[in-house]
Amino acid sequence: MKNKLPNFLIVGAAKSGTSSLHNYLNQHPEVFMPSYNKEGMKVKELRFLIKDLVQHRLHNGVWSWEEYKSLFNEVKNEISIGESTVLYLYYYEHAIDSIKKYLGENVKIIIMLRNPTDRAYSAFQHVSRGLKEQNSFEEALEIEKGRIDKDSSLTPMVMYKEMGLYYDMVRAYKENFKNVHIIFYEDFRDDTEGEIKKIFKFLGLSLSANIDFISRHNVGGKRWKNEKMKHVFMKKNPLKSALKKVIPKSLRKGVRDTLISASTDKVAPMKENTRIKLNAFFKDDVKKLSGLLNRDLTHWTK
């Protein structure tokens, strides 16, 4: 009987295009990636392999081995079975141990990397759309050190700087697994089809699959116009309950997207002085990463 467990993982980095990659891969007929859990809820970030580190602070995830295995029960004849959890890169030591324990050492690893300064700002925008981030970007950078240790309700995504120190993370994966594929956000953005086909080749898949490369997934770049509207959408309240009763389920997403679009503005560019400071912070790590991957990435911090 075929082993119905992942033989490849998309491990991060967060806010580097992994949602699009996940969805493009999942269109391939020779790929299986779970879409729904046993409650019928949509899943992408399973987080099982780091459950001991994040279960107490993240609501969504798969926390038992039995449930994790059950998500792959529908595997039929697919060549590649995978899952995506961007925090596997940040929590690389724990994740690597768990991957070896549960999935073995032959798992193929896909890592997406983005300019760490841009990634940090994108992560801030993502978190601040919710209620967990009430600081400005500059304030959040100042208080980052030790922040999640002091507040168990915070997502690890608030480690805006630390999550962009890729060198140790990538080196550890390369040292522990023989099949590691690195993809860069700018390459993926500029030639999506070409980069996806490189991954198909890496996974041993047919290159002729019909994939929709037009649709975009988990697109950021928006900010709430005011805090009141943010709380209306993000918290339980009588208005949301009333609307749920009168709007059919099939129409809710479209209505919600329209209302959110009307209540948000495009994100302002990062302050130039902040960019200069972040570039200086990441400079040494990027230089080491360039050597590790034999690709000059120093333009990221110029």
Image (spheres, helix red, strand yellow):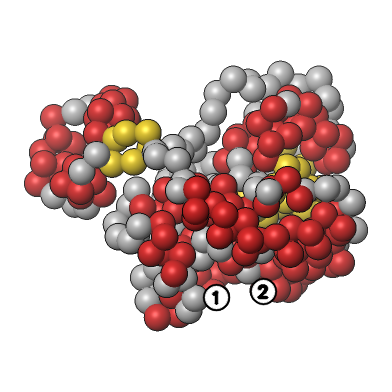
In this rendering, is residue 281 above or below 262? below
Residue 67 vs residue 130, the one in the foreground: 130
Residue plotted at (54% across, 52% down): 275
Instruction: Identify which residue, 277 or 62, lies in the foreground.
Output: 277
Q: Residues within 10 Å of mark 1 (few under 14, many from 20)?
A: few
Circle 1: element type: helix
Counting from the top left corner in percent of width and height, residue 123 is at 49, 52
Asked if residue 26 lies left or right of residue 295, the reply is: left
Mark 2 neighbour class, 10 Å CA radius: few under 14, some 14 to 19, many 20 or more? some
Q: Is residue 187 above or below residue 273?
A: above
Name the N-terminal-most of marks 2 and 1: 1
Residue on which the image places disc 1: 52
In front here: 134 or 209? 134
Give the residue type at disc 1: Asp
Residue type of the residue flagged with mark 2: His
Mark seen at residue 118: none
Q: Position of residue 91 (x, y in %)?
A: 63, 69
Q: Nearer the viewer, mark 2 or mark 1?
A: 2
Side (left or right) of 234 relative to 10: left
Judging depth in this view, the residue of 40 and 25 nearest the camera is: 25
Percent x, y of residue 48: 58, 64
Residue 85: percent from left, percent from top: 60, 55
* Residues at discs 2 and 1 in contact (Cβ within 8 Å): yes
Please give the residue where the numbered disc 2 appears in the rendered image.
Answer: 94
User: Which residue appears at 24% of the width and 34% of the height?
Assistant: 263
Dot 2: element: helix
Q: Is residue 130 visible?
A: yes
Q: CA distance from mark 2 to mark 1?
A: 9 Å
Give the side of residue 181 with respect to residue 269, left or right: right
Quadrant of residue 178 within the rendered picture: bottom right
Would you say residue 58 is visible in this rendering?
no
